[in-house]
Image: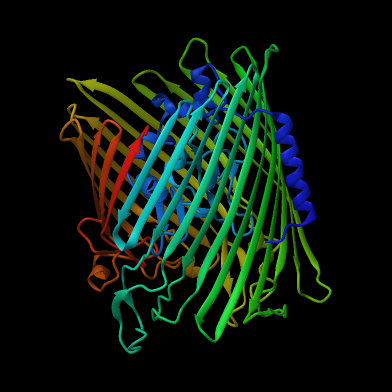
Amino acid sequence: MKITPEKAMTKVKLVTFMVCSELLFSKHVLANSTEQAADVEVIEVVSNHEFSSSNYQVLRREDFIDSSQSLSDILGQVNGIQIRQISGVGNPVSISIRGSSAKQVQFFIDGQLVNDSQFGSFDLNQIPTEQIESIEISKNQAIGTGSTPIGGVIRINTYNPSDDTNKVSVAFGSFGYQELNVLKNTAFKHHSLAFGGNYLASDNNYDYLVPQSFENPSQSITEPLRNNAFEKISLFVNDSAQIDQHQLRLNLTYNKQDKGLANYQNNSPENSSNISMDSLRYGLQYNWLSNIEYLDSIEVEYYNDTKDELYLDSQNESQQNTNDYQTNKQHLGLKPSFTVSNFTFSPFANATKNIFTSFSSHNGKPNECNGISACDIEAKQQQINVGARFSWQSKSLPLSSYFLANQLFEDNSNVALNQVSPSKEQSKKQYNTQELGFNYGDKKLKTSINWSQGVRTPTLYELFGDRGAFKGNDNLLPEEAETYALSVKYHDTIALMSFDVSSSVYQQSIENSIVAIFNSSGTGSYTNVSNAELLGLELQMGSKITSELSVSLQAHWIDSDTQSEYVAFNNKKLPGIYHQQYSAALSYQLSDALAIKVNTNIDKELYFNRSNQFETNDEQNKTGNPANRIVTDLSLHWRIENYSINFTCANLFDEHYQDLANRPAQGRSIQLKFSIEDI
């Protein structure tokens, strides 16, 4: 990747600032635990069960770290979340929260929004689970401050312990899976330093029904996938410190990965297509804890994310297309916090700059920008968010409320790099979002009511296309949604048996859905085509029946209806999501050292396109187009002192199953993980 003078100067400024700072950030702590529930941006809330609800949940490190699961496996067990993954480890993974699209979900790592401005996507599994301290999930509102999303928020808080810690783990599994993790943390007088590394590889050579076999194109043959291997190295450093009223934290992450791209049509042995990626992300957070009356703190944050993706399309020796996508994101934010009596006021302002550049070639020669084939482009997006969060806590009742308002100013531009006298396309827009919530709760019963108006702004690709056969549409309106949600959670103990019951009902109206449309000549563009109404219900129950036996049950129903000017798409169900989901999990402590867990998921009512022509049902199951999916996972965990072994069998009773896109995915797979702590 080329380093421009502008990028070099940015790095010099950052290093100078880091040296002058001398200290590194540690996590912000507030004394009032109830205010922590309202301001979920405070990371310390993750250790407290009291604030969990159906709309906001926290998964702690101890909930998932002993297994060999990926982040997508962990999130897929949360009620209301659906995962779409194709073709094994390393391929793109997208997430849907309560029927949303992946572009409508905000994904944060240590407070950094990592959604791609060009395509709106993010790599759900870019961070290994061993490097995660906690996972915060908000299903219909922002976390802390910022813009309100349509599809909720996933926020990852990375590993940053305060005590000396060492850990090594190794895992092996089906289809050539292997993984190695190393973690170390050293605690000093005023700061702690944590660093670690992860190596992951998989052959991904599971059996696949090839429509036109390379050896015999007239037949469909089931055979192991070729050129589907994945390899990844991930390194991270977290350094945090506190002296008096000053807190600083630095986090640094580097990822390098390579993924073969299988030819699903004929599984050709000549195919050598692949995608490789290098990414470097670093962030610095400074927090001053004030001793001035009414002023609690002032927080400043900066982060930079650089990514280089190289796509190689080489189906045979005579053809080779390359696409090099380079992305850089920079962010600077400021947030003071004031408290007067039982009111907290947190104004905020942040600026983000995204630059996307593509370089392409065919057999070593640059592609021509001729209005038919895709052009090399440079696309820029500059965003400024300004807003405030107001929180109130009753002094006499367990009652609290909040209001969050945000104004987004967005400047987008696109220019072709290899076009004679290229024209610069530009779009300037501004949007506003807001949300309001009330919470009431005692030790047994907790309720929350939320209302929000969220937006999903068009991506750069949706606005400007590729300057080729896919045209842009700079008149696109943002996707908008108004959401109402009611959540109730009840906890009690009867005859020494503790149990939790929670439910959430939500209603969402979505306008101006952005969809790709193609004409008869194959030219495409994005346009606003439809609206949708969603009504959903989540139910879940967990109980510790005895000291050894625990059980949990979950159910999620969605009723959706789309309205479109196109008759074929009017009054149809939303495609790409299951409208019914049920799950049951049973955990039993066989001995002090050994525990077993069985989890079964049943998914129903999936539609594959907007016209619902291929609605899935039991009849189609008989014809080899499965829809109602049943997956059972089994895990055994053994632990003595600092040593642990975890055995997992995913999809226990089915060698093959369909993923959310109705594509064959890896079926039954086994993983064995060994861990040693405090070496």
Q: State how the image is colored.
A: rainbow
Horizontal side of 638 relative to 378 (left or right) equals left
Horizontal side of 76 relative to 654 (left or right) equals right
Horizontal side of 673 relative to 242 (left or right) equals left
Which residue appears at 30% of the width and 31% of the height? 501
Please indicate, yes or no, whether residue 337 appears anywhere in the rendered image.
no
Instruction: Check the image and name the residue furthest to the front.
Output: 679
In the displayed structure, 308 sits above or below 169; it is below
291, 543: nearer the viewer: 291
Which percent across, then down, holds residue 297?
A: 66, 21
Which residue appears at 47% of the width and 65% of the height? 259
Which percent across, then down, holds residue 535?
A: 42, 46
Please indicate, yes or no, whether residue 159 appears anywhere in the rendered image.
yes
In the displayed structure, 244 sits above or below 91; it is above
Q: Quadrant of the N terminus?
A: bottom right
- Number of marks in the rendered image: 0
Which percent across, then down, holds residue 456?
A: 60, 50
In the displayed structure, 281 sits above or below 677; it is below
Q: Quadrant of the C terminus?
A: top left
Q: Residue 367 appears in which quarter of the rendering? A: bottom right
Instruction: Check the image and name the residue furthest to the right.
Output: 421
